[in-house]
Amino acid sequence: MIKEVGIDDLPQAIALINEVFAEFVAVDYPEQGRITFENYLKTKHDELSSDLKSGHKKMWAYYQNGEINGVVAIRDISHIALMFVDKRHHKKGIARRMFNFILEEIKQNKDVTQITVSSSPYAVEFYERLGFIKTDGQQEKNGMIYIPMKYQI
């Protein structure tokens, strides 16, 4: 089941993000990138609480047996800010289900014609399978390595 993450579930969602990032994404990052992301997550609990309340960001989780197995967040109406799935649940269609869920949410705004993501190198193939295309080459900001991509609605 996919439902919006509440403030009470935020620590569990952030822990999942941190764990998956450390194992699958951080390996492609220089030390500065790992530090940037770790600092981002440390400050995220308070910021996310505020952003979720204001609507600047929306976050959903894939729950199974009361446990969060995946997390997806969007910001600015149509940019995927985070998408992580617990490694024990990779290749089970959870990320695709979460994407299809947010796609329907985003489509409700008739002015939105595309979804963007700054994909980690690890996730590029996944996003391409969803129909995203690269819009530029690999970028780096504060050690965070990403590939800009978009999905036409």
Image: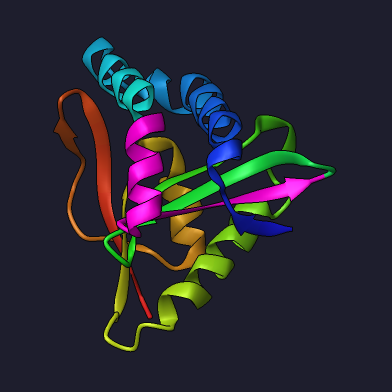
Comparing 64 with 139, the one in front is 64
Q: Is residue 44 above or below residue 81?
A: above
Residue 151: percent from left, percent from top: 36, 70
Q: What is the magenta range? A: 45-64
Q: Is residue 49 magenta?
A: yes
**Left or right relative to 73: residue 116:** left
Residue under the image location 32 percent in, 56 percent down: 54
**Left or right relative to 131: residue 68:** right
Q: Is residue 6 above or below residue 32?
A: below
Residue 101: percent from left, percent from top: 57, 68
Q: Is residue 42 magenta?
A: no
Q: Is residue 82 above or below residue 101?
A: above
Residue under the image location 35 percent in, 60 percent down: 55
Residue under the image location 47 percent in, 27 percent down: 21
Which quadrant would residue 28 be assigned to in this image? Answer: top left
Please, which residue is most extreme toward the right here? 65
**Left or right relative to 20: residue 139:** left
Comparing 3 with 145, the one in front is 3
Residue 25: percent from left, percent from top: 43, 28
Residue under the image location 60 percent in, 53 percent down: 95
Q: Is residue 141 above or below residue 126?
A: above
Residue 110 appears in view: yes
Which quadrant would residue 108 be assigned to in this image? Answer: bottom left
Please, which residue is most extreme toward the top here? 31
Please, which residue is most extreme toward the bottom here? 110
Comparing 122 with 115, the one in front is 115
Residue 6: percent from left, percent from top: 56, 47
Quadrant of the image for the N terminus?
A: bottom right
